[in-house]
Amino acid sequence: MESKLKNKLLSYSKVAGGILASSQLANADIIYTNIDPDSTLSVIDSDTLLLDINNDGTDDFRIDGRLYDVTYLSVSSSTRRYAYVYGLNTNSISATGGEGFYFPIAHEKNQVLGSLNSNWNSQFSPTATFKMAQRNRRFSSSTTFNINTNGQWVNTTDKYLGLRFKVGVNVFYGWARLSIDSTVGTVVVKDYAYESTPGKSIITGVVPAGSVSGGIIAEDINDLGNAGDIKVSFNKASDESLIARYDAIIVKESESATFNDSLANIASLSGYSTPIPKTGSNISTILSANTPDKNGAPIQSNIPYKVFILSIADGGNASVNSLSNASNTITLESIPLSGYVLLGSTDDTVKTGTVQLIKRNPDPGQFPVAAQAFIDEDGSYSFPSIIPNTAYNILVLPDIGLYPNSTPTYNGGHVNWQKAPAIIANVGSNGITEDIIVNNVTSVPSGTGKIVGRVVKGEGVGKVQGPGDPLNGLDVSLIDKSTSTPSIGSDQTDQDGYFQFNGLNDGEYGIYVNIPGVPIDTNYGINISGGVADETLVKVTVDSDYIHFEDATGIQIIGFASKPNLHIYPNPSDGITKVDYELKQNASVLLELLSIEGKRISILVDEKQLKGKHYNQLDSKALQLPSGSYLISISIDGYIERKQLITIN
């Protein structure tokens, strides 16, 4: 029966070869082979099983079944069943000897096999034959019988055979998991493994998860300047039965040569990876944008990286993670944003100060500062990477110590973010250049008028302070409405929320409170006549989605329960935008699309409506709206609510 089982195992080895090829990758120490289905040797049929542990085409070990009928004085007196194991080509087996027999040790799981193990059979004889299990059935003259057994493998389940084999001058250690039924007379071989590092010990039963097969391809598909740029593709492991998931780990190219299993496991446990579910198919996925590199550092543009895939063991049958080879090198491209900061109408540059890159949010509320840069001595600034199809503004904050008459200025020379055009880069853009002219007041005020105001919190602003509490440290700009001068002065609110402008001539003025992302009523104006302002104190109230003035014409603040819960989606939008709201009572409704400066573009609703939910929509393409920021404004019996809409057309 030798040829039958040998052919069976050789047929299996074609499958095993794929498993081995997937495991024999960089940093993969344990090479594991799962025999599926298990190979069963029949002692009664005198079967033979050959094991090629390292799949190099040379058999390393042989297991035999033998059945004997022993005749004594012409009477059949004994039936003996033996299971033998041989170490071929001077290969060795972990065993014990005594009374003229050598018996292989039936190791338990998690035992160490290596050079310190003193039970390798070479101390007895390098070509010794070992009885794994012996069962004798002895008959007496009265035809009664007794049974005796020898060896550690009699009627065992899932024990480990210690193996030592040579390839050239190198010695390797491994194990095979077997079960033996001495009563039926079968030997079942289930799986085996060896440590691929010469001379390194191995632990019985430690099984690695299968590594991915073939190469890993990393591509730069976006211009986000983070891991969301990276698309990774790889072939699944040949055997995913021992895998819980995959982890994609990003490593700087300069550190990839020394990246190994231990470092990969640390990165995975630290959360410095993108988990990828196993799907049963080959995988192509975009990594999570917030994935750092293996050290926890943010992914940056213009730095070469490689991607590794760590197969995470299921923790049951497999307990060791397996690391793949590295991907190709990938360097993330970026969309830079840069320019010069000029002082007023002069050709002079602002040589010190900061520049904020502000991300325009589609939701109401203050815009976040995405990045900050310093102005260089030549007046230049730069941001190495901005996200495509995302709206930004730039806010310049000159050093008021050197430029006391300057005011905070947005791109386009505006002190009001609502008037500043959105900066949007398309995918594949080579970069954007945006020079900014800072407002600089050169004329000295000569009038006698003054404007005093106070900025306080309204509903939904702040978590510690409540409505009516002061807002300090806000930049406030004064605008001459009669001359359309962008800014004729600036101040900051003090700890009590107050600001003040002095030396003003007669005329009409506007006030702008700088909170990027929160629109302000630009229609408001205050008059000075004969050196006296028509308001002794301008009260500015900041809600979460709007800044208004206490006496702003036509605005009446009503209870929160009456607010319509204006909802805009999708936002940003590249076409049809749905606009929903709910009326708590019958009301007169004016729903409008406004420019970011507050100018009317289109009226969506202007009628009396019944209590309940109402659904509307607008088509930005039909209205031929350029990409940018707009306002959806709803007025309900005098109450006004506005939310920002970003279009990408």
Image (cartoon, grey):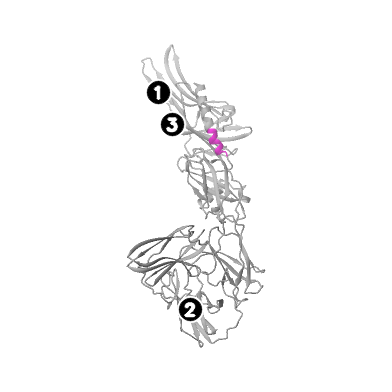
- Residue 166 drawn above or below residue 638: above
Instruction: Examine the residues drawn in magenta and state their main secondary structure.
Output: helix
Q: Upstream in the sequence, badge 2 or badge 1?
A: 1
Residue that mark 1 sits on:
147
Residues at badges 3 and 1 in contact (C-beta under 8 Å)?
Answer: no
Q: Nearer the viewer, mark 3 or mark 1?
A: 3
Can residue 297 be seen here? The reply is: no
Which residue is outermost to the top? 74
Q: Which residues are magenta?
A: 16-24
Residue type, label 3: Thr
In this rendering, would 441 be left or right of 464?
Answer: right
Residue at image position (63%, 65%) is: 339
Q: Upstream in the sequence, badge 3 or badge 1?
A: 1
* Alpha carbon separation for disc pair 3 and 1: 17 Å
Residue that mark 3 sits on:
156
Residue at image position (46%, 18%) is: 68
- Residue 386 drawn above or below residue 232: below
Residue 370 at x, y = what percent?
Answer: 54, 63
At label 2, counting other C-alpha atoms closer than 10 Å, the crowd grade (few under 14, some 14-19, many 20 or more) is: some
Residue type, label 1: Ile
Q: Upstream in the sequence, badge 3 or badge 2?
A: 3
Residue that mark 2 sits on:
525
